[in-house]
Amino acid sequence: MKTTKTKFPILLLLFSAWMFLIACNDDDDPVPMEEDDIVDIVTSSNDFTVLESAVVEADLVTTLKGDGPFTVFAPTDAAFTAFLDDTGMAADDLLGSPDLADILTYHVLAGEVMASGVGAGELETVNGASFYVSEDVDGNFWINGSAMVVDTDIEASNGIIHTLDYVIMPPSQSIAEIAVGMTTAATPEFTQLVGALQRASLVDAVSGDEGDLTVFAPTDAAFQALYDTNPNWNDYNDIPMETLTAVLTAHVVPARAFSQDLRTGTSLTPLNTDASLAIDLGAGTVGGAALNTDMLNIHATNGVVHVIDEVILP
């Protein structure tokens, strides 16, 4: 019996020591690190200094530190530089623009969208306007035909970041408004196209904010080359109405197609369904007309414009 009595204190001591060791091990467990939110990631990167300033100026810091989740397509500093160079705008003018918040929120989607969930098509932004994703022949994704998605799936506590190599802008003009505006530019363009559309009563077909159109827009020089083929044609007024209408409607496709959507060996069916616009990217032509590579993907509220250097003849 003496031996039995001494075992209980020993067992109790061993049990207490074991529990103490467990408690010590629990105390030594590392404290989980809190994941950075979208704003934290932007501010900690040397690639987003302009974006950081823009978010502050637009008073969007609190929003983008919120629960979200958000998907942000973030232009890098190089993207802002390219955009400012192309537009001739100074960085201070952009940061002081009353439209800055609208521009930034045009880069943001509600919810988490990983790269695997991004495909060709339309996506609505928190701005309320949509942007359009295209996939080129090399598998790269582009937004509105102007900004390529570079890095993807940068995870934040409140969403996802994908980086862009250009700034995207919500369109503010219809195709007709863009064409008319270019007739009064320092170097006027599209005076013949606009006049021809007016004569054929087709302006309404490329006007308005609704619709998905692609217009292959011939330059004034392209129209002049057409007139030169017929000694009786000095301008669009000399072209028979039936012929003029058939020619113009061969340049309008009832779908939004950015240059990255085009594939050699395929064709587009325009409003003039008797025509077929064959695509040849190697030759740089659509419907046999040369694409002006410096003036592609002009984004409008109702579609996209590609400038061509020849008139398409159906």
Image (spheres, rainbow, N blue to C red):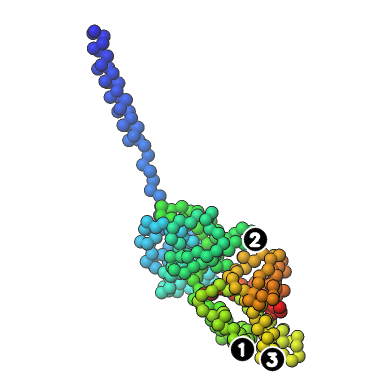
Binning the other alpha carbons within 10 Å of mark 1 as few (below 14), some (14 to 19) or many (20 upward) gives: some
Q: Earlier in the sequence, mark 1 or mark 3?
A: 1
Q: Nearer the viewer, residue 106 or 274?
A: 274
SS for callout 3: helix
Please name the residue shown 75% across and 85% down the image: 229
Q: Would you name the residue on which mark 1 appears? A: 199
Please name the residue shown 38% across and 48% down the image: 34
Query: Distance between the Cα atoms at labels 1 and 3?
Result: 11 Å
Three-letter amino acid code of the residue under disc 2: Val
Please name the residue shown 32% across and 35% down the image: 27
Which numbered mark, 1 or 2, is in the foreground of this view?
A: 1
**Quick check: 311 above or below 39?**
below
Q: Would you name the residue on which mark 2 appears? A: 137
**Residue 70 visible in this rendered orientation of the protein:** yes
Q: Is residue 263 left or right of residue 36?
A: right
Q: Earlier in the sequence, mark 3 or mark 2?
A: 2
Tell me which corner region of the image, top left, top right, bottom left or bottom right, holds residue 290. Answer: bottom right
What is the residue that sits farthest to the top in this orientation? 1
Please name the residue shown 43% across and 73% down the image: 99
Percent position of residue 123, x then y: 50, 64
Quarter holding the N terminus? top left
Which numbered mark, 3 or 2, is in the foreground of this view?
A: 3
